[in-house]
């Protein structure tokens, strides 16, 4: 990866890093009970490894294209 990264890429990578963090230690007893001993990563919503899954740009721009009224969307 390049030494100098664009700001948009830095922000995107930073957001993904926050999403894959372990849960705080106090969440486990609150969610599962006082005597339960589990790893904090069990309660993490997004599980991603830098080696397995790569981060790609979202395709929201393509999804936002709207069909103009009066036009028929054809399958072929």
Image: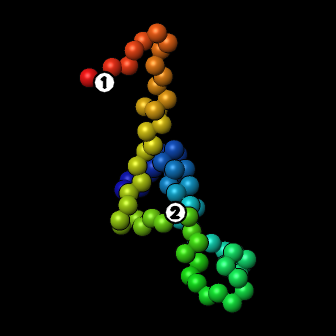
The residue to which callout 2 is attached is: 46
Q: What residue would you read off at disc 1? A: 75
- Report the residue at 51% width, 50% height from top: 12
Is 46 above or below relative to 12?
Answer: below
Residue farthest along the bottom direction in this orientation:
35
Residue reaching furthest top?
A: 70
Crowding near the residue tagged with mark 2, few <14, some 14–19, many ≥20 C-alpha atoms within 10 Å: few
| Quarter location, residue 55 | bottom left
Nearer to me, 14 or 7: 14
- Rounded to the nearest whole Å, what is the CA distance between mark 2 and mark 1? 35 Å
What residue sits 43% from the left and 45% below the top? 57
Position of residue 28 in the picture relative to residue 19 (left or right): right
Q: Quadrant of the C terminus?
A: top left
Of helix, strand and loop, which one carries label 1?
A: loop
Label 2 secondary element = loop
Q: Are marks 2 and 1 in contact (CB under 8 Å)?
A: no
* Residue 41 locus on image (x, y percent): 55, 75
Q: Is 72 on the left or on the right of 46, as rendered? A: left
**Is 2 or 24 nearer to us in this picture?**
24
Q: Please state which of residues 46 and 67 is positioned toward the viewer in this rendering.
A: 67
Q: Quadrant of residue 18?
A: bottom right
Left or right placement of residue 54 versus residue 70 in this view: left
State the residue at coordinates (48%, 48%): 9
Q: Position of residue 14 (x, y in %)?
A: 54, 56
- Of callouts 2 and 1, the N-terminal one: 2
Query: Where on the picture, by quarter, is residue 3?
Result: bottom left
State the residue in front, 60 or 12.
60
Q: How many marks?
A: 2
Q: Nearer the viewer, mark 2 or mark 1?
A: 1
């Amino acid at each position: 990866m390049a030494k100098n990264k664009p700001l948009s890429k830095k922000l995107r990578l930073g957001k993904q890093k926050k999403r894959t963090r372990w849960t705080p230690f106090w969440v486990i007893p609150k969610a599962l009970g006082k005597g339960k001993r589990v790893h904090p990563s069990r309660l993490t919503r997004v599980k991603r490894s830098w080696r397995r899954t790569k981060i790609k740009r979202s395709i929201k721009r393509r999804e936002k294209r709207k069909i103009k009224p009066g036009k028929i969307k054809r399958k072929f």
